[in-house]
Amino acid sequence: MTIGDTLLLEVQAISAAGDTVVDADIFWAIIDVDSGQLGFTLDATTGTVVAIETGSGRVQARVGDIRSDPITITVVEPITRSPHQPRGGPESRGVVLSHNVLSTRHRPRSSA
């Protein structure tokens, strides 16, 4: 992500049978809260990430006690075009990331 970007993370809860769980209460969490170099904010209920400064951190989705694999969010400085670079050149293009999709599989709890 580039400073100033907004990213909406999406997740899909899937049952042990492979069916989508439509009414799952999904929450997002930053799992590197002590690093001090995140560079972004995260809305825990919507999965909205806002890039505010350079840095990096991991986030994951949670449904009850089940957690997704973490994904890394990295925030970088915007790429600025050199006055000698023609418009549309590679240095003037940033990477646009619209969303990431995580699948959280519900695993039945053992009775032990």
Image (cartoon, helix red, strand yellow):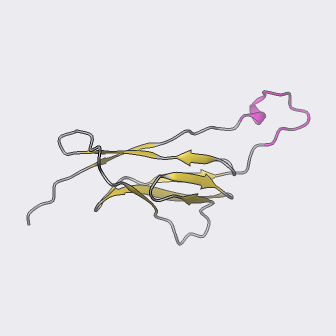
Picture quarter containing residue 60?
Answer: bottom left
- Check residue 21 for magenta coloring: no
Residue 29 at what x, y percent from top left? 45, 61
- In the picture, measured across the screen, residue 49 lies left or right of residue 64, that is right
- In the picture, measured across the screen, residue 99 lies left or right of residue 85, that is left
- Check residue 87 for magenta coloring: yes
Reply above or below: 64 against 21: below
For image coordinates 77% across by 35% down, the residue present is 91
* Residue at the extreme front of the image, as rendered: 23
- In the picture, measured across the screen, residue 28 lies left or right of residue 2, that is left
Q: Which residues are magenta?
A: 80-93
Instruction: State whether the magenta stretch is mostly helix, strand or loop.
Output: loop
For image coordinates 27% across by 40% down, the residue present is 20
Residue 63 at what x, y percent from top left? 31, 56
Count of picture labels: 0
Residue 13 at what x, y percent from top left? 31, 46
* Residue at the extreme bottom of the image, as rendered: 34
- In the picture, measured across the screen, residue 17 lies left or right of residue 39, that is left
* Residue at the extreme right of the image, as rendered: 83
Residue 54 at what x, y percent from top left? 68, 57
Q: In which quadrant will I find the C terminus?
A: bottom left
Picture quarter containing residue 86?
Answer: top right
